[in-house]
Image: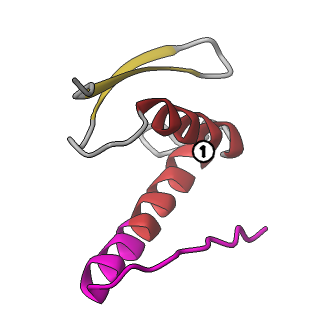
Amino acid sequence: MMATHLPYRATTATGERFDISFPLHPNTASPVRVSQMVSAILEATPEKRSANPGKLGHRGVTLGMLLMNFSHVRNRLLQSGTAVEVRIRWLP
C-alpha cells in the first residue's frame, strides 16, 4: 500500500527543526521523489530572517512566490485537458 503522508524534517541554518507531515495524493508514484524535490527547493531558497518582527524573511517570500507560480501552472494544466510537458526556467 502506498504511503498517505510523507514525514519530512526541515532544519534551518540556526538549527531549528520542523517536523512536517505532507499529505500525498493516492496516485503519488514516488514519495521519495517528492521528498527529494522538497529538499531541493528548500536548499535553493535563501534563508534570511526579516529585520521586521512578524514579517517573512527571504525564504518565506520566495516560498510564497513559488507556491503562487506552481498554483498557476497547475491550473493551466488542469484547464488544458491534454497531456502537457512543463519546463520551468529558473530566472536569476
Image x and y of residue 74, in percent: 35, 70
Visible in this render: residue 35? yes
Look at mark 1 in the image and give the residue it sits on: 41
> Residue type at mark 1?
Ile
Quarter of the view holding residue 5? top left
On screen, 8 above or below 62? above
Visible in this render: residue 57? no
For the point 49% across and 45% down, the residue is 56
Q: Nearer the viewer, residue 40 or 3?
A: 3
Q: Nearer the viewer, residue 80 or 41?
A: 80
Q: Quadrant where the C terminus lies?
A: bottom right
The magenta-colored residue range is: 71-92
Image x and y of residue 52, in percent: 53, 42
For the point 43% across and 37% down, the residue is 30
- Asked if residue 32 is among those painted magenta in the image, a careful observer would answer no
Q: Secondary structure at mark 1?
A: helix
Specify whether 33 is left or right of 48.
left
Quarter of the view holding residue 18? top left
- Residue located farthest toward the front when viewing the structure as drawn: 1
For the point 68% across and 21% down, the residue is 13
Q: Quadrant where the N terminus lies?
A: top left
Specify whether 68 is left or right of 12.
left
For the point 41% across and 74% down, the residue is 73
Specify whether 19 is left or right of 91.
left
Image x and y of residue 39, in percent: 59, 34
Q: Callout 1 environment at 10 Å: few (<14), some (14 to 19), or many (20+)?
A: few
